[in-house]
Image (spheres, helix red, strand yellow):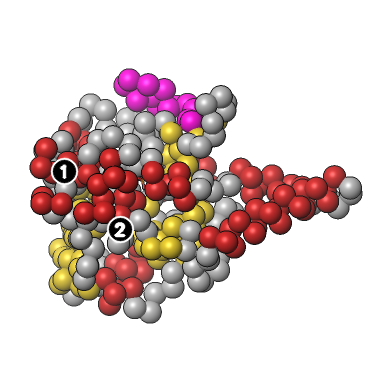
Amino acid sequence: MAFRWTNTLTQADVTPKSAYLNRRQILAATAGLGAIGLTGTSAMAQDADALEPNTLEEITSYNNFYEFGTGKDDPKNNAHQLDTADWKITIDGMVDKPGEYALVDLMDGLTVEERIYRFRCVEAWSMVIPWNGVELADLLNQAGVQTDAKYVAFETVVQPENMIGVQRGVLDFPYVEGLRLDEAMHPLTIMATGIYGEPIANQNGAPIRLVVPWKYGFKSIKSIVRMTLTDQEPPTSWNKANASEYGFFSNVNPKVSHPRWSQASERRVGGGLFAPRIDTLMFNGYEEEVAGLYEGMDLTVKI
Ligand code: MTE
């Protein structure tokens, strides 16, 4: 694939957390060397700093997963109840080989890559997360996407007995999401199965969840059990809950405010109480890679 992005690592295997910590230490050391005249290294350190991943603790203890409650620590406290054994995903609709696939079979032969992505919630907080996963395109192609398909509809598992948020009916479950087919097939779009080289925690959407880094976090649907190829724009949970606030595209856009707050800046989780807010970037910093998908569209209308 000729496609390149600047802020990801390309190694094929998952990397243990210790390697990240080492890398940070090495970068800290090279930044020091820069000060005594080794040009280039300090700039490298700066780039890495800009995308310094949040800690595993932060990533797994401040979550949105309404099936397990609406508080930020509810998913951590309740998601141990999620049953992820023998996970299967139904791929149906406009595909050559519809059916219920075992996750292990779908992943067989695919390369799990490491992608360090910015993650921007519509609530104006953000993190940097080192995901492990596969490109969604590679998963979908196993089922043979037909040429008239235009969208992918996604659905999260519903286990009422295990999910307190489902019992309370805090949203209309199953949680559903959708992407246009070109968005789904874009090489930045991944299905994550790990974080920091460890299997993805239940509260982050085990055993497999979508990650679309240029869109608000709610598009990145967790614990997926169905993907349907269709020629109709699929319904999405937050648009169903509040259509005046949440559109289908939900691209990160600092110039388009949420009706109740600005999207111009964000709070990086873990930055501390007095850390300055940081500017939100168009398409969450992935403009160069994805702006072409939306050429000719008025992004203040198509939200
Ligand atoms: N997927 C499901 N099934 N249920 C949810 O409530 N919340 C979304 C998204 N995916 C959600 C979901 C929202 S609002 C965000 S910001 C991200 O998950 C949070 O992902 P994280 O908890 O891994 O940071």
Amino acid on which the number 2 mark rests in the picture = Ala
Q: Say which label, 2 or 1, has the lower sequence index.
A: 1
Residue lying at the far bottom in this picture: please name it.
109
Q: Residues within 10 Å of mark 2 (few under 14, many from 20)?
A: many
Image location (x, y in percent) of residue 198: 43, 63
The part of the chain drawn in magenta is 255-267
Quadrant in which the C terminus appears:
top left
Q: Residue at x 55, y 57 (%)?
A: 8
Within the displayed image, which quadrant is ligand 1 positioned in?
top left
**Taken as a whole, is the magenta stretch helix, strand or loop?**
loop
Q: Which residue is mark 2?
A: 206
Residue 164, quarter of picture: top left
**Spatial CA span between label 2 and label 1:** 17 Å
Q: Residue at x 20, y 48 (%)?
A: 176
In this view, the mark in front (2 or 1) = 1
In the rendered image of this protein, does residue 150 appear above or below residue 134?
above
User: Residue 112 vs residue 210: left or right?
Assistant: right
Labelled disc at residue 164 = 1
Image location (x, y in percent) of residue 188: 44, 56
Q: Residue at x 77, y 48 (%)?
A: 31
